[in-house]
Image (cartoon, grey):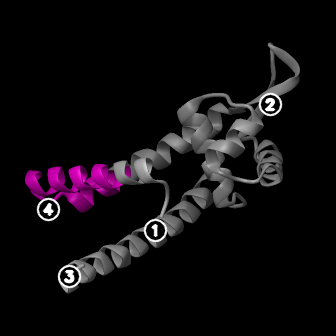
Amino acid sequence: MTEEIETAIATVERQLGVLLETVRVSLRDHAERMHPELLPTGYKVVGLLVRRGPLHPGAVADRLSADKSLVSRTVKQLEELGLLTREPDPADRRACFLVATPEAVRRFDEISAADQRALDERLRDWDQEEMSEFGRLLAKLNQSFAQGGQA
């Protein structure tokens, strides 16, 4: 590997680190905006349920790669905050579905809309070619992770 390639890879790694930290901070902010007592995991659970619809607790844990006990504690908090309900699974009376409440959906949609506006503002100075290339490169990176596992 040439020195130029090693330098370029190091730059990408640093910038991905900056981006991931930005996402972590943003997730904490999103959780607080949804409810002052909500932790980031709770926001992730609500987001998953809003996007995917009702899910069994085990499916939530699997999709978030989270420990089932963490999901269980988070679900309890979300129920107490009025952001989630449990509904019986008609196919299996012992099981339940987790469902985001209308209030959770409303708050999630408000936060998502504000994020979209902020992203639009940040990208306003980019030309169409830059945005297209950035999107293409992100898709290529995501595809390489999907094909070769995680870093």
Q: Compare marks 4 and 1 and give the one earlier in the sequence.
A: 1
Secondary structure beneath label 1: helix
Q: Give the range drawn in magenta.
A: 117-142
Secondary structure beneath label 2: strand
Q: Give yes or no for residue 133 being in the magenta stretch.
A: yes
Quarter-wise, where is residue 87 in the image?
top right
Identified by mark 1, the residue type is Leu
- Residue 115, x across and y down, in percent: 40, 53
Residue under the image location 53 percent in, 35 percent down: 51
Badge 3 density bin: few <14, some 14–19, many ≥20, Cα 10 Å: few
In this picture, residue 54 sits left or right of residue 118: right
Q: Compare marks 4 and 2 and give the one earlier in the sequence.
A: 2
- Residue 83, x across and y down, in percent: 71, 41
- Residue picked out by circle 1: 20
- Residue 19, x across and y down, in percent: 40, 69
Residue 149: give its label.
none
Determine contact: label 3, label 4, CB under 8 Å.
no
- Residue picked out by circle 4: 125
Q: Give yes or no for residue 120 being in the magenta stretch.
A: yes
Q: How far apart are marks 3 and 4 (CA)?
A: 34 Å
Picture quarter with the N terminus: bottom left
